[in-house]
Image: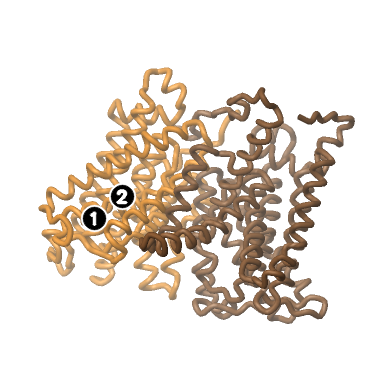
């Protein structure tokens, strides 16, 4: 029983990282209706930025300085990407944006590999290896931190989108770009802001990921699993992304433990295909049949 | 400048809009038929092999083009269908069927499975479709590993030689014969593709691409049309996969991975979406870039003493070229060629906005 609970907790923490990457997709999708296929690579870049600032092997800054620095730098990079490249794509088809971000992912992977090398490194954190004992369960501090940070971020972003003026402006910009523009929403600035936000979230996900395990330039491919998570939850919904991430994170270790060999890799995608077949808009669907 | 006078409605769907075009394509055909003679003279079968693999990639590109370029359904998982075609071909050949039967049947199997998979996926559009096909592409690798009894799994499986009219065609033993086999398949595919475009089916594909709602209003059944597009596209991809297997002579679970799916998509975008020429131009670019990079590396190393051996640089350069194309030439290489030709045709009356496309600003389908 304790074994099973242990499995659940570590799956939960894994699911939180997936959920955080998925949050990044959803943020961008919610506000610009574009899908950032490079979000996983942003996560990887955020992790490497933090590693580069904090680890002794590189700059060796204090951990609590390195984390905000990594978040700020990645947010700026993400914003610059939107303002310089993506802005020119306004009015083009969604598929071109998809291809553009896939290409960006390749470039980022190459850049990270050239700067920080292709060897897996892990982030040196002050709480590495620390545990919390809880009625027979052994919880790593990093796992607990991951879960708490993810829950907080999801709740904050949800409130941000539903309650604040800027959040509403972001939704308006996605629902009808021209109409929002006529209504006085500064669409360009709003979109750059949301890309910066997504970059910051990706950096947080990267820090949490690198603190729990090793990171290497191809870790961005994890983004594909996060996609499954986002699509299971329904692309436009923040709580959906979180729940989708949890589903993927929990199913994986359970299938690996109790299912036949090879099922663990297949399970997330099989769930994705089933969800898409049964509820095309995801579990927290926001899509309805279009009226002509 | 030439002026076309249309004297009958059939002119719109002629094979060639102008007799001169027919002439140029005949010249191209003759050149392609005579190409092995040049390599035979040079005794360089390596480059011929490169040309052959470009042709195979072009066939796969045609398959994806039919789906993405003509019908407007983006697929990030076409390597999965190539894998189905390849493994089906190998299994049928190993079961003792002659190549002339096994090869087309492998294509049909890929098409049938593609349609089967496509049915639940078809209700999705845009991003969700791309995601579902991406998931398929990832799943296919796992399925190949799991189905070890048939596919050889991680260890891989050897692809038997083609036996055709009593001859045995092997990529290494007789590259010239293999080239002609691939060229023949390529020509047949192009002919079928062009005929589809000329037929009502092709028109309904374009109608779905441009606006599903208006297509429905004109009496096109979107589900049936999309299923047909999936079937044709996956069949062609399956054929390309089978040829790819013969070209590689040995395939493993890593042969048809996600990078290949993405390469296919990049190929047709660089070439120019929605054109037959685009598939070929894209395949040429994709085939040439690694060669160019390798040559540049050698030049840098020998003349300047710079070691250009940075891991992953091929993919980065490829991605950078792609970003450049999407930003500055969304119509691809073929689009650029059209512009240049029109510039000469209309000289001096070419205007900048001649090929400008109407922008469609975003309106969501989501509701709060």
Chain rendered brown = B
Q: Which mark is residue A208?
A: 1
User: Can the viewer see residue B307 in this picture?
Assistant: yes
Image quadrant assignment for residue B116: bottom right
Crowd tier of the residue under label 2, counting other residues whose Cα lies within 10 Å: few below 14, some 14–19, many 20 or above: many
Farthest front residue in view? B303
Query: Split into 4 quadrants, where in the image is the C terminus of chain A?
Result: top right
Pointer 2 chain? A
At 49% across and 51% down in the image, what residue appears? B131
Image quadrant containing the N terminus of chain A = bottom left
Q: Is residue B230 above or below residue B257?
A: above
Numbered disc 2: secondary structure = helix
Look at 13% across and 56% down and name the residue there: A60
How far is mark 1 from mark 2, CA to CA? Answer: 10 Å
First in residue order: circle 1 vs circle 2: 2
Q: Position of residue B28 (x, y in %)?
A: 75, 53
Q: From the top left corner, tell me how far across and down residue A100 is, in percent.
A: 46, 44
Please give the label number shown on residue A93: none
Q: Are marks 1 and 2 in contact (CB under 8 Å)?
A: yes
Residue B322 position, x and y percent, is 49, 47
Seen from the viewer's position, the closer of residues B352 and B134 is B352
Where is A107 relative to B33, above or below? above
Residue A218 position (above or below residue B345): below
Residue that carries the numbered disc 2 in the rendered image: A20
Q: Position of residue A254 (x, y in %)?
A: 36, 68
What colouring method underlies this structural image?
by chain
Query: In the rendering, what colour is chain A?
Result: orange
Nearest the viewer among A82 and B294 is B294
- The reply to whether label 1 and label 2 mark residues of one chain is yes
């Amino acid at each position: 029983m304790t074994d099973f609970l242990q499995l659940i907790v570590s799956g939960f923490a894994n699911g939180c990282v997936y959920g955080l990457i998925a949050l990044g997709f959803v943020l961008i999708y919610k506000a610009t209706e574009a899908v950032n296929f490079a979000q996983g690579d942003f996560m990887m870049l955020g992790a490497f930025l933090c590693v580069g600032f904090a680890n002794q092997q590189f700059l060796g800054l204090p951990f609590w300085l390195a984390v905000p620095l990594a978040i700020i730098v990645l947010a700026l990079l993400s914003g610059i990407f939107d303002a310089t490249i993506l802005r020119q794509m306004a009015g083009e088809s969604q598929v071109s944006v998809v291809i553009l971000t896939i290409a960006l992912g390749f470039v980022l992977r190459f850049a990270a590999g050239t700067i920080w090398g292709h060897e897996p490194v892990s982030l040196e954190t002050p709480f590495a290896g620390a545990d919390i004992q809880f009625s027979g369960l052994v919880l790593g501090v990093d796992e607990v931190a991951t879960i708490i940070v993810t829950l907080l971020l999801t709740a904050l972003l949800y409130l941000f989108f539903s309650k604040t003026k800027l959040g509403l402006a972001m939704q308006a910009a996605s629902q009808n770009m021209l109409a929002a523009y006529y209504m006085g929403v500064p669409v360009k600035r709003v979109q750059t802001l949301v890309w910066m936000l997504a970059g910051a979230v990706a950096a947080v996900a990267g820090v949490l990921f690198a603190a729990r395990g090793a990171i290497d330039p191809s870790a961005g491919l994890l983004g594909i699993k996060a996609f499954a998570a986002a699509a299971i939850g329904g692309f436009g919904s923040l709580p959906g992304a979180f729940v989708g991430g949890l589903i993927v994170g929990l199913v994986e270790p359970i299938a690996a433990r109790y299912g036949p060999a090879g099922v663990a890799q297949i399970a997330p995608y099989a769930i994705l295909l089933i969800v898409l077949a049964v509820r095309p808009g995801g579990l927290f669907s926001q899509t309805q049949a279009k009226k002509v | 400048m030439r002026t076309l006078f249309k004297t009958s409605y059939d002119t719109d769907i002629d094979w060639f809009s102008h007799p001169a075009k027919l002439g140029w394509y005949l010249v191209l055909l003759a050149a392609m038929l005579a190409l092995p003679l040049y390599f035979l003279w040079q005794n360089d079968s390596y480059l011929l092999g490169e040309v052959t693999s470009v042709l195979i990639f072009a066939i796969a590109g045609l398959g994806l083009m039919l789906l993405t370029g003509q019908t407007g359904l983006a697929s990030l998982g076409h390597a999965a269908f190539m894998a189905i075609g390849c493994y089906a071909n190998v299994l049928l050949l190993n079961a003792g069927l002659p190549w002339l039967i096994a090869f087309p049947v492998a294509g049909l199997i890929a098409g049938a499975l593609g349609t089967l998979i496509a049915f639940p996926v078809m209700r999705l559009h845009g991003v969700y479709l791309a995601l579902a096909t991406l998931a398929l592409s990832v799943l296919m690798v796992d399925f190949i590993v799991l189905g070890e009894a048939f596919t050889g799994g991680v260890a891989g499986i050897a692809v038997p030689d083609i036996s055709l009219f009593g001859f045995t065609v092997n990529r290494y033993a007789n590259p010239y014969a293999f080239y002609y086999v691939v060229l023949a398949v390529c020509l047949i595919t192009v002919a079928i593709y062009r005929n589809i475009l000329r037929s009502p089916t092709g028109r309904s594909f374009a109608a779905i691409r441009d606006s599903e709602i208006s297509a429905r209003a004109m009496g096109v059944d979107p589900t049936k049309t999309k299923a047909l597009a999936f079937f044709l596209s996956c069949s062609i991809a399956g054929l390309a996969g089978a040829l790819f297997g013969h070209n590689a002579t040995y395939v493993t679970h890593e042969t048809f991975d996600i990078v290949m799916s993405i390469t296919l998509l990049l190929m047709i975008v660089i070439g120019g979406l929605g054109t037959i020429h685009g598939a070929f131009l894209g395949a040429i670019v994709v085939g040439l870039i690694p060669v160019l990079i390798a040559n540049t590396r050698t030049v840098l190393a020998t003349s300047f003493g710079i070691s250009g051996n940075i891991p992953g640089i091929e993919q980065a350069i490829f991605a950078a070229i792609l970003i450049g194309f999407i930003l500055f030439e969304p119509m691809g290489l073929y689009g650029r060629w059209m512009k240049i030709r029109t510039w000469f045709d209309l000289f001096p009356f070419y205007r900048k906005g001649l090929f400008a496309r109407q922008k469609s600003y975003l309106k969501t389908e989501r509701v709060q």
